[in-house]
Amino acid sequence: MDILLVDDSKTMRQLVKRALRQAGYENLQIGEAGNGAEALSMVQAEQPKLVLSDWNMPEMLGIDLLKRVRGQNCQVPFGFITSESSEDIRETAMREGASFFITKPFTTENIDAALAPHMSK
Amino acid sequence: MSGPTAFALSHLFTDLVDRPVNFSEAKTLPAADAKKVYAVYETLPAGRPIIVQADLPFVAAIAGLLIGMPANIALERAQVEPMEDSVRDPIYEALNICSTCLSGDERVLLRMMTTNKTKILHPASELLKKSGSAVNYKVVISGKDCGLVSVLGVY
């Protein structure tokens, strides 16, 4: 798996996938998880090259997912796509080891700029 | 604290659906009342409520654009009680993303979405009783009138 998308909204996962295709990442294998627990097991089993996660999800917040992933000594590039836009949240994400932080609504250009250092097309 | 501007709302929804969405402040309200969707937000850490009251044709049109569904079909599905998930999810997402422009300097979280305003609890319900706390916007998407959006909050 190349990219694991984590969002409790199926619509948002579809929108991100569409943006990834439009940004030129159409040949990548993209997996989806609807919550943090599912994502955690997919990170372990499938070892994606990059994780793109929402922040506010029921059961496990995106930041807790990041902490759990890092707690397993997994250094996979991990970015957020979220409607959270405060500087505090962004700083928390980066302090915990996030690679990038995209605020919704995102554009194809935002996605491409964030992913380019971590993924080849 | 500052509320959203017509410019900020226009910019946000235009970016979201990649079509021209224009909000303009409405001083007078139309006589015909469309069915509404209510999104209830909470600012953090203050815990101050904000409500976005949107005409169903507007949110259905936005949902349709997000998922590639014609606006009339999206509206039909949005009018079903309970609302069909195929349009409920994109409407919820659009209103969730709307939280980013509701307050200039606070974190804002979407707490609930409903078409039944009697389900809105105190203290948010108080906003519905005070007409003075509302700013009303007429919304046009790609040149087509899609109704009204009102932002209710104490700014």
Image: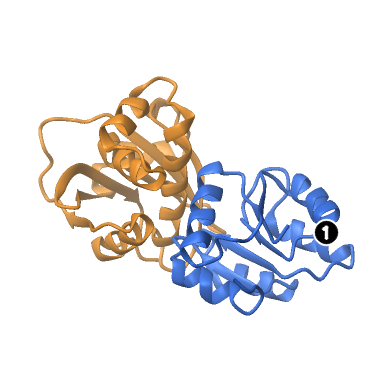
**Between B131 and A109, the one nearer to me in the picture:** A109
The structure residue drawn at horizontal position 65% and vertical position 67%, both measured from the top left corner, is A79
* B94 displayed left or right of B8: right
Position of the C terminus of chain B by quadrant:
bottom left
Q: How far across and how far down the image is residue B52, in percent?
A: 35, 45
Tell me if residue B32 can be seen. Answer: yes
Decide: few, some or many residues near mark 1? Use Cα within 10 Å; few <14, some 14-19, many ≥20: some
* A21 displayed left or right of A78: left
Position of the N terminus of chain B by quadrant:
bottom left
The structure residue drawn at horizontal position 47% and vertical position 46%, both measured from the top left corner, is B93
Q: How far across and how far down the image is residue B136, in percent?
A: 22, 49
Helix, strand or loop at mark 1: helix
Q: How far across and how far down the image is residue B111, in percent?
A: 52, 43
Specify how the rendered protein is coloured.
by chain
Task: Identify residue for label 1.
Answer: A68
Q: Amino acid at mark 1?
A: Arg
